[in-house]
Amino acid sequence: MSVLTDLIYNGSNAVAGLTENAVNEAIAKYGEDKKVAMPDTAYFLPTIYAATGVKVTKLGDLPACVGVLKSLITNKEDLGEALNAGLATAVGAEIIEALKYVDHADPYAEDSGIGFVPDPIIRSLGVPLVTGDIPGVAVVLGKADNAEDVVNVVKDYQSKGIMTFMVGDVIEQCAEGGVKLGLDFRVIPLGHDVTSVIHVVTVAVRAALIFGNLTPGDLPGLLKYTKERVPAFVNTFGALNEVVVSAGAGAIALGFPVVVDVDLGENQVPGALESVTDHSMTVKKSLELRGIKIKVTEIAIPVAFASAFEGEIIRKGDMQVEFSSHKAPTCELVETVSADEIEDHKITIVGKDLDELEQGQTYALATYIKVAGAKMQSDFEPVIERKIHAWYNYMEGVMHTGQRNQIRVRISKEAFEKGLRLKDFGEVLYVMIMDEFDIVVDKCEIEIVTDTEKVQEILEKKAMPAYEARDERLETLTDESVDKFYTCTLCQSFAPSHCCVVTPERLGLCGAVSWLDAKATKELNPEGPCQPISKEGCEDEVKGIYPDVNRMVEEATHGALSRVTLYSIMEDPMTSCGCFECICGIEPFSNGVIIANREYSGMTPLGMTFGELASMTGGGVQTPGFMGHGRHFIASKKFMSAEGGFERIVWMPKELKDDVAERLNKAAKEKYGIDNFTDMIADETIATDEEALMAFLQEKNHPVLGLEPIM
């Protein structure tokens, strides 16, 4: 037997023994009927469920899983068989980790890692993964002989937007080396036990279940999906023990190459298991092995610039200064002008710069951008404007919230001390606009204004009139007022049988792609994910049936789908990839529908959580009676119009209801003559079961009670 296969089998057998003992001890202590589950997931023990189809719900289900685990360890002198033993190690690790959650609400409370990654987080990562903001996933584990080596590697991944999961002492080594850790920074410590590596494996496995419509129990399909569609890889630091090697074999079986920093000599497997002892080459080799190509935009500013910093939160005690509409005038405006009115790459600061403003105070801010281009259209102005939010957040030490004239920008003391100034903000905007919008923008000039009177002048004379004109345009921008819709197939890298149809009144279900965004995307990338759909020959305006919609969807999904109605939840509803903001489902007792949003983790009156609803709605399949959609669609007059419209809504989580209340109440007054419609809609503070829901609806005389049966 080779050294490599010997190490793998030794590790797998060791984990199998530990797992069997742990299961037997747990059953002896708690009994076979004791519930066992990972937190906040609809996929039971995800690895076991995806690979075997077994729904583990209690301790008595585990001995059979241990039997499957042991059957994968053949101890045969064959690399393929040894990799299967690596999968056995993954199963064992999942069982061991699941047992930690029996009778422990948070077994990682005393650990610097987070343990299991819940379903909603995976769904929230869908959009940045498919757009390339997260171009890959790194797993970094072990303990580096020289802490600086792993610190440099992880910082390099962070600067490239790679999401990094960490296991072992590398967590402390990176924290002490100044790496910013946490979900907000896309550097996520999982835990110190080697078995906690399963928590990143389950991320990949659930991607297959959530987005790929994988049939549980289809192990070949699972391995094909993770290899082809999950851009993950593993880096180990320090000496390798048998369990780490066996876990690495499981990663290789899933299609994730492993790069180690010790010399394996002849035990290397080209393309799958390779040694890189020069840590300056670790990142390059890892990306090459996974086929990840990263477009790096170099910007000459004194802080790091990467999508990994987008979620950074700057507390008041850590801020140098802030600009906020709560205390001063603010605005962000992109305006199209003629080419002779603009000086390309001119960046002007009007008012005091950061080093002239008093620390800890709040000031006015206007970001005023003038663009010119032969192909530039006024409809593209808000598309560029909305990107300011992301680009400012990409700067390490900068936090941006809001849009238009309601914004807050905070700069950290650390970023200020590194030399960050407002001219750097202008440089970021110029470089990114000319990089991402170069097809429509030929010249760009930027003014950043902190002088309060000048900000007020820009706000009153330029920004507010522009916002009002756009709002008037959006008011008239209905599905009837345009001559085309657009496809959006961004998510097909994860959900190959899904295609969104984007209309003025129905944004992409992720909430990130509006009709104007799709129109701009088509202009910027003519062969890209957003292609025009003719509205000619409409067969049914109420249901939203268009021949060209069906043709384009069938073409975009390679025949997986041949018929879609845009405004029905019952008849050929639009598919969902899995990163939807909300799910709507029929509530049969009330004859209405409930809507749950991704952030809501509680129970719905359907007896299912959001995750459980999502498990039967995503993956690019049509599920009559359920549909994924964006928040904005809820108040659309096209929402479920085939079944009576949003008058059917009987329940929403309170946070979602409050968020959409203004627009939904306005639409309900206009369409149905109902005042304060959201007061008639229940939430989790009122009801989470059908009996309490029906009592509330009858008390409020909800209009759904007088509607025709929905089924």
Image (spheres, rainbow, N blue to C red):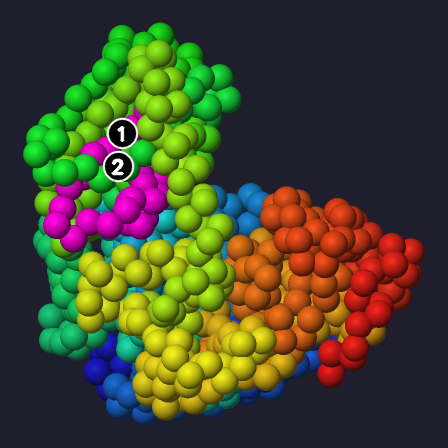
Q: Classify mark 1: residues with Cα within 10 Å, few (<14), some (14-19) or many (20+).
A: many
Q: x, y (%) of residue 573?
A: 54, 79
- Proximity of marks 2 and 1: CB atoms separated by less than 8 Å: yes
> What secondary structure is found at the residue carrying circle 1?
strand
Taking 394 as reference, is 97 left or right?
right
From what the image shows, is residue 603 above or below residue 315?
A: below
Mark 2 or mark 1: name the one nearer the start of the chain: 2
Q: Is residue 353 visible?
A: yes
The quadrant in which residue 472 appears is top left
Q: Amino acid at mark 1?
A: Tyr
Q: What number is the disc on residue 547?
A: none
Q: x, y (%) of residue 364?
A: 38, 18
Quadrant placement of the C terminus: bottom right
From what the image shows, is residue 65 above or below residue 323?
A: below
The quadrant in which residue 528 appears is bottom left
Foreground residue among 65 and 373: 373
> What secondary structure is found at the residue carrying circle 2?
strand
Q: Amino acid at mark 2?
A: Glu
Location of mark 1 (residue):
368
Quadrant placement of the N terminus: bottom left
Residues under labels 2 and 1: Cα distance? 8 Å
Q: Residue at x 55, y 56 (%)?
A: 631
Which residues lie in the magenta part?
A: 366-389
Foreground residue among 104 and 226: 226
Q: x, y (%) of residue 525?
A: 20, 63
Q: What number is the disc on residue 335?
A: 2
